[in-house]
Structure formats: C-alpha cells, structure tokens
Image: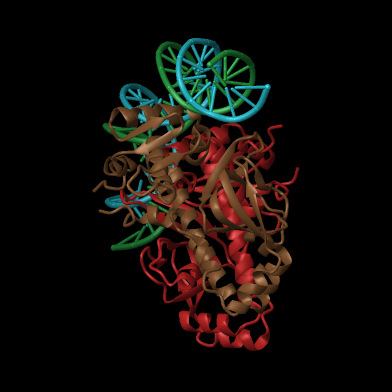
Chain colours: A red, B brown, C green, D cyan
DNA sequence: CCTGAAAACTGAAAAAGATCAGTTTTGGCG
DNA sequence: CGCCAAAACTGATCTTTTTCAGTTTTCAGG
C-alpha cells in the first residue's frame, strides 16, 4: 500500500498551485501586472487574524503555516502551505474580517498580487472562477479529513500522520540521493497535532528508539515510513 | 456577550441558503427544471463516501448530517446541515470520488437538482460561481474553527459548544413561546464531539445536575445558555 | 398495551494525556 | 569561540478520557 494511496494522506498533500498554471496569457499578464515579490524570514507574519489581507500570496519558495489563535493563546495549525501554493484568497472572496493567520515557516520567497487585480481577474476570467471552485472544494476535503483525524485518533497516531505528510512536503528540498529532512520546531509540530511540545518530544524519542526516525537538533529524518504508516492506524484491517 | 457574537459559534451557524435565493428568474427556472422533490425518513442516506452524487440536494425541511467513516468504522460528523441549505456540490465540483457521506437526521423534504443542470447553470450564470465561491470560503472557515476546537478543547467544552450550536439549528422548529428541543441521539452527539456516547451521557447528566438543561428521553432542552457558554471556555478572560 | 431490540445510562478500572518543574542542549550573535 | 536565551528534553504527578461490563429505559411495531 503506497503512501499516496492512503486516502486522507494524499488529500493532505494537495497543492493549489494549479490555480495559476497555464492561465490564458493575457489573463496571467494582467494578474501579475502589479505583483510584488519579496523575501520573508522565518517567523514573519503574512497576515493576521481579523484583518483583510492586501492581496493574495503566491509562495515561490519556502513554506507557510496557516493557523488560528484561541482566546487563551493556544495556536492551532490547520495547514502547511508549500512552494507553488496560493494563500489568502478566502478572506478576499468573503470580504470579511478573517479568522486565520499565516506565518512563514522557513525563509521564503513570496509574491503578493494586489486584491484588486485578483478580484478583477476573477470577474473577467473564464477559467479562474472554475479553478478556484475546484480548489476550494478540494481544500474542504482536506479539512474534513483533518477533523476526523483530530477527533478520533490518539496523539501518537496523529503525530505519525503529521510526520508522513510533512515528509512529503519537505521532499522537494532534499538534494537527490540525500535524506529528506523535516525542519520544524517541536512547538509547531505540537500545534499541528493538537498537543504540547513535551508530548511531541516523548513520542519522537519513542519513534527514534523504534528505529523509525533520527533527529539532529530540531531536524527529523524519517527512516522507515512503513512503520510510521503502521503506527498511524491506517493499515488496521 | 451574545451567542452570535461568539466568533466560532456564529460561524458554525452559517447557512448556505443564499446560494439559490434571488437568482435571476431565468437562471432559477432552468436550475429547477428537472428538480425532484422527495420525502426522506430519519436515517436514510443521501449519498455515500466514494461516490459521485446524482445531483445536488436542497433541504426544504429537516436536517442532514455530513460525516466521514474511518477504516475502523468510527463515524465523524463534521457538519449538520439545516433546512434551506444546499449540499453535495463539492463532489460535483471536483468531479471526484468523494470522501463524505450524508444521512438524514430527522424526517425531511429534500429536492434534488440533477448534476447536469447544476453544472450548466454554473457555466452560464453570472452570479452563481461568485456565490459558490463565497459560500465555500465561508464553509472553509467553519471547518478551521472546528479543527481548533476539536484539537484543543476538552470533551466537556466541545460538548457545550456543540449544544449551543445545535440549539441554534433547532430553533426554527420550536413553536413560538415553546422550548427549543434538540432532538439528536447520544451517538450522533458523540460523533460530532469526537468521543463515546457514554461520555456524552455523563456530561449531559452533569449539565442537568447543574441546572443547565433538561432531558426527556433523547430530547434535550437547554435552560441556561449563559452557563453553557461559560463551560465552553469562550468567556475565559 | 405489550414486548423486544436499540438506545441510554452507570460504575469501576485502566490508559492516555496534560501539567509542572525542572535540566540539558542548541544555535545565533557579539 | 564562548555566552545566553530559546528550544528541547525528562520525570513525576495529576487529570481526563476511554474502555468494559453490565443495568435500565425508551420506543416502534405487532
């Protein structure tokens, strides 16, 4: 059974990059007319809860976490966006103060397309609305899977699943033939899985002892995806 | 602080009914040309995981639960759709085998609009794609809130929140001046909250003892929404 | 109005997870 | 290269949640 064959996991890997790919040239030109490319450092915030972003963001290189912060300060990461993905359009589409925040997970190159250009392109374009609809529907599915996993699986299983998914997301960066390195803080991992960082440490130690992965500082290298999948609970029966 | 002012809670109450409201007459006519209205009984299944529905469903009266079933048979309800809402369009938009199921929660009147008519209307209409985009974006927000709640709140808090939301959904059915009655099985409640039905029973008993609600059989009548909100953890600080 | 199956409830025990209070390690910066 | 703050780790304890093994109640159909 392959990883991508595992239903909720390949859904989690969905990329919205297709939105801008192969747009009619004229539309693409117009959309990118006032695009601003910028370097962001780890930890920088793209937009914050309760605001309407200035535009939509296209991640050319790097990774961005999408999260919400609770009243009592607890952070929940519900998506890690990879290079090639587009974020920030939900707020612009609903034109509402938006409950999500986005922060840069590792040094990234991100382009910003002004709100107005995006909305205009959406009005004019013949393909953009359809693509967005499909993308949103797909994202919806990703979230419903996350809900099932968070509500029903143990912390160990959730962490195993998160690691499998993250491994896929960090695949691109590995030099050919070299290890895939997941570079993410324990706290961020905890905020994906919905637990504390102490728990993440504990289970990572357990996985390490079981020969499933290695750690060097905060870096995680997965050695045995098969065992992780077993632990994730998706091979049961 | 009003219920609807509570951020994640009013989001959960979102209705997608606006999608079909006040469409241009011609478009509406065309969309409804082959619409089939039908009575459904409690427990009937509208569509099942892994299928593409024949059409989209408009709930004229009643309620429908949207859920996913895990490999090991665990059911997770991620949304309760109310009268006025439209369901089933995700699968049709992505044109994929779809991971969600929908079953009738109480006797309902539901109209089915054939897939082809819906897709054609989507192509022709000037307002439908935009509306769907907004609706989907909004639904997305509802799900991210659910994720935060499920990942970070205790079972007691989750149940409190679920009850507040369900109370809003069952509001319409209460005769003026009479109690709002939440009519849902313990098992379904458990599958919303992500726990077992024994736990639901336990906490309901606790709430009853605290004067927060009454139960008659499986019916739940909430007496003190304020206390429930307090228990939900949303008044903290 | 009975009756049987499904649903709801209860208690006790075990397991899982959160929390607290530290110690050790890491990695960026002067 | 060493220092310092932040992050990671560890162990012990306490709380929450699950699980199991029943009993009681409800309610739909005969």
Q: Which of the 4 quarters of the picture holds residue D12?
A: top left
The quarter of the picture where the C terminus of chain A appears is top right
Where is residue A219 drawn, in percent x and y?
52, 49
Where is residue B4 drawn, in percent x and y?
34, 56
Position of A44 with respect to A113 (left or right) is left
Residue at 39% x, 31% y: name it.
B215
Can you say whether A53 is above or below B44 in the image? below
Question: Which residue is situated farthest in the right direction here?
Answer: A1
Can you say whether A13 is above or below B41 in the image? below
Where is residue B156 drawn, in percent x and y?
38, 35
Q: Nearer the viewer, residue B192 or A198?
A: B192
Q: Nearer the viewer, residue A27 or B19?
A: B19
Q: Nearer the viewer, residue A6 or B111?
A: B111
Residue at 45% x, 29% y: name it.
B217
The quarter of the picture where the N terminus of chain A appears is top right
Q: Nearer the viewer, residue A172 or B110?
A: B110
Is residue A196 visible from the viewing direction of this image?
no
Where is residue A236 drawn, in percent x and y?
68, 33
Residue at 40% x, 71% y: name it.
A52
């Amino acid at each position: 059974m392959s990883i991508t064959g595992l239903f909720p996991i390949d859904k989690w890997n969905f990329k919205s990059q297709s939105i801008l790919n192969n747009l009619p040239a004229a539309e693409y030109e117009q959309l990118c007319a006032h695009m601003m490319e910028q370097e962001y450092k780890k930890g920088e915030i793209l937009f914050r809860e309760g605001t309407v972003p200035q535009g939509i963001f296209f991640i050319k290189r790097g990774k961005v976490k999408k999260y919400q912060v609770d009243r009592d300060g607890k952070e929940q990461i519900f998506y890690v966006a990879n290079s090639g993905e587009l974020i920030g359009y939900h707020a612009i589409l609903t034109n509402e103060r938006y409950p999500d925040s986005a922060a840069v997970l590792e040094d990234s190159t991100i382009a910003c397309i002004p709100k107005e250009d995006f909305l205009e392109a959406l009005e004019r374009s013949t393909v953009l609305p359809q693509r967005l609809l499909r993308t949103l529907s797909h994202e919806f599915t990703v979230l419903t899977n996350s809900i099932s996993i968070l509500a029903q699986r143990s912390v160990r299983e959730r962490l195993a699943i998160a690691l499998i998914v993250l491994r896929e997301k960090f695949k691109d960066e590995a030099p050919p033939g070299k290890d895939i390195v997941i570079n993410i803080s324990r706290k961020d991992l905890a905020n994906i899985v919905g637990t504390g960082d102490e728990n993440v440490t504990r289970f990572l130690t357990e996985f390490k002892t079981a020969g499933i992965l290695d750690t060097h500082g905060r870096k995680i290298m997965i050695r045995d995806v098969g065992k992780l999948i077993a632990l994730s609970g998706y091979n049961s029966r």
